[in-house]
Image (spheres, grey):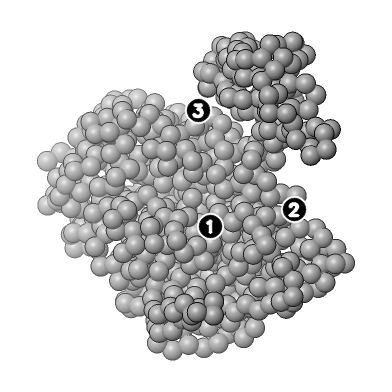
Amino acid sequence: MKIFTGLTPKIWVTGLAIAGLFTVGVTSNYLESSSHREAPIIANDPLADNTDVYAFRSPTNPENMVIIANYIPFQLPHGGPNYYNFGEDIAYDIHIKNNARTTKDDIIYRFEFKKQNQDPTTFFKIRLGKENEKATYTVKKSMDGGSTWETVLGMGKVAPYNVGPRSIEGAVGLNSNYDALMKASIMKLSDDSKVFCGPIDDPFFVDAGGIFDLGNIRAQAAPDGLAKLNVHTIAMEIPSYRLSDYKRSVNRAFNVLDSRFVIGVWASASRKQMTVRNTNGTVTSSGDYVQVSRLGMPLTNEVIIPIGRKDEWNATPSTMENGKYDEYFVNPELALYMDDSQFGGAVPGFAPLRIQSKSLGTYDFRNGKPGLYPLVGNSALNGTALDPKLYGNYLLRPNAPRSVDLLPIFMTGVPNLAPYQLATGKNGNPLAKGKPFINNFLPTFGDMLRVNMAVPATPRNSPDFSSLGLVQAAVLGLTDARFNTNTKLEFIPNMDGFPNGRRLEDDVTRIELQAVGGIVLAAIGLWYDDYIPGSSSSPVTTDLLDVYTFTTGVEQNDKPFQAMFPYVAKPWDGFSEGHIAINCDLNGNARPASLNIQNTNGLGLAAPEVLLQRVESYPNPARDVTTFRYKIGQPSAVSLQIYNEAGVLVSAPLKNVQKASGVHETVVDVKNLKSGLYFARIQTGENTFETIKFIVTK
C-alpha cells in the first residue's frame, strides 16, 4: 500500500509570500463566550458558573505559572444595588494533574467565601468606609485528591466591586483608588503562591450574538458580546516546582518540550447537596459538596457537548470521564457545518472552513468518514504515535476521523512524536519526523487545559506575539527562515499559546473553529483538497489560506490587560462605564443613546408626535447605496449625518431639510466609503435624534 510517498511540497519556495499574508491576517484586527450559561441548570445558578480557565507561564517571573479561573458571567457593571460577589456554600476548586499514573487530582486548591454586612442600616453597597456583602475567603490545599486538606490561607480579602468614583475614591466612600484596592487584595499563601480574588473585566472576547445565531459570522464589523461586562476571578501565581510531579522548577528542564513539566488544569464549582429555604428568609445548606459546573478546555461544553448531556457533563469530574463523551470529539457537530455534503451550505459564515475530504488525494476527514483508519496494520505506522503498540488503538478508530487530531487535543494532549510534528522537513510524508512544536501529552483521558510549563513565555511586546497561539507557531515553523531550514527542537514564538495552555490574549474561538476546519491536519502535512499530490505546486493553497485568514470579527479583548499580576484588566465601573447595553462602538466605547430626547417642558418629555419611529437602513450591509427609512409624527426639519467608527463625520446627506409628517426614505451613496462600520444619526428639530449602525462592504 503506497502512502505518503513521492510528495515534495515546496514549502520554502513560497514561505516569504505566505508569511506576508499571514502577517496581514494576524495584525489587521477587527476590534469588536467561552463557557457562559452553557448548560440548562447552571444557567440558573450564575454564582457557580465557570466561565473560563487560563494557564500560562508568567511573563514577568519565568519560574512561575499563572492559573486563572473565572465565574459569574455577564455582570453588568451598574448591576446594583446588590452587586455581584462570590457565593457562600460553594466550593470553587482549581484542579491540577501532573501524574498520569494516578486516577485522582494530584493538587486541588479550594476557595470558600463568606460575606458580611458592615453597615446593615443602608441600602448602598459602600458608604463611609464600610462595605456591605463584603467577602472574605479561606484557601485549602489537597495533595491526595481531596481526602485531606491543609489550610494555606485563613483570611483572604476580596476586592470590592467597582461601583463608581464616589463609592471608591470619595471621602463618603472608601477614600481610595481601584488600583490600590486590587493591589491590597493580592494575598500570599503558605506554599509560596499568591492569589487575587475579585471582579475584573471579562477577558473573553467573541461575537456571542453572531456565533449563536446559527453561525451568523459578521467578520467585518462584529461587536464583542462581552464588551464592558465583568466576571469574578480567582487568579493564582504558583511556583512551577509546586506544580510539577518532578518537584523541580522549570529552569531545570532539559529542553523546551521536557515532558516532566506537563500539567493538566481544570476548575469546578460545587454546591452543598441539601438546600433549605427557611420561612424567615434565610437559606441553609448542608451535606457533601456536589459538582455543578466545570471547565477545562474552552468551549467544550458550550459548542461540543449536545444540550441533552450538558448538565451531566458539568456534574462529571474531568478525571472520571472514561471516554463516555469521545463520540462528540471524533465526529463533532460543528464539522457538519463545514461540509457541503452535509449542512455547510446552510451556514455561509463558515464557508471559508472546509475540512479535507481528499487530503493527499485519499484521506477523508468529514464526519463518519474513515480519516486515517485505513492505515491500520500498515508498517509505516511503526514508531509513530499511531503505532498500536503506542497510542494507535486510541487515535485510530473506524468512522471516527477526528480521533487523530481533535480527540487528543482535548482529551490527552499531543506527544512530540510523528505525525504530530510540523511538515517542515518531512519531504511530503506526514508520518516522517518533522520539526517538533508541541508536547503537552498527559494521557489522563479527560477534558482539561494541558500545558507544558517548560515552554518559555513569548514576550507580549514581541512582534512575533500572536493571539493565534500554536496556529501561528506552526506558521512560523513552516514559513519563517529563522525556523524552517532545520528540524531541530527549538522555541518558536507562540508555542506557549493555546492549546498548549491558554493565555489571556489567545483567540480561542477562532483557533478552535480553524482546528475543526482541519488546520492542524494541514500543519503536519495532510494538506487541503486543492493541493495536487506529487506536483511541484505549493501546499499553501487557497483552501489553506481561507482557513488561516478566517475570522469571527472579534480578535482581541475590549480592554488592555495589566502587565503585572493578576494580569487581568480592572473591572468596569458602574457609574461611567455601565451603559453598554444601549450602544457601544467596536472598541467598547459608549456611543450616544439610540434615542436621546430633551425638551424644555416641565416634565422633560418630548411630545409623542415628534418622536422618530421605525428608523432602519437597507440593504445592510451595503455596497454602493443604502436607504434610510424613518417616520416622523409632525412636520420637522430633518438632518442626516454619517460617522465612521472613530466618530469622524464623513457625510451629511441632509441638513435641516423640511419634511412633512409620515414615512420618508433617503437614499445615500456609499461608494466612496471604505469597508467598515458606520453610524447614521437622524435628527428632527434640535433635541430629538436616533443613531443606528450600518455596514459598508466592498
Q: Position of residue 158 (x, y in %)?
A: 66, 72
Name the residue at 44% across, 69% down. 268
Label located before the other in sequence (1 or 2): 1
Query: To which residue does mark 2 refer?
Result: 575
Residue found at x 14% / y 45% = 374
Is residue 369 positioned above or below 173 on the image? above
* Image quadrant in which the C terminus is located: top right
Please tell me whether mark 2 sits on a helix, a strand or a loop.
loop
Q: In what element is the residue under mark 3?
A: helix
- Answer few, some or many: residues within 10 Å of disc 1's Cα (few below 14, many 20 plus, some between 14 and 19): many
Any part of residue 290 in sight: yes
Hey, what amino acid is under mark 3? Ala
Indicate which disc residue 325 carries.
none
Residue mark closest to the camera, 3 vs 2: 2
Nearest to the observer: residue 214 or residue 287: 287
Residue 23's x, y, as percent?
Answer: 55, 34
Position in image of residue 504 (x %, y %): 57, 54
| Residue type for callout 1 | Pro
The residue that disc 1 covers is: 73
Q: Which residue is mark 3?
A: 17
Left or right: 29 as drawn, with respect to 541 = right
* Residue 451 place in picture, x, y as percent: 46, 62
- Going from N to C along the chain, the mark reached first, 3 or 1, is 3
The answer to whether residue 303 is above or below residue 665 is below
Q: Nearer the viewer, mark 3 or mark 1?
A: 1
- Residue at image position (39%, 72%) is 291
> For mark 3, does the 10 Å Cα neighbourhood hold few (<14), some (14 to 19), or many (20 or more) residues?
few
Q: Is residue 188 above or below residue 80?
A: below
**How far is disc 3 from disc 1 in space, using C-alphas?**
42 Å
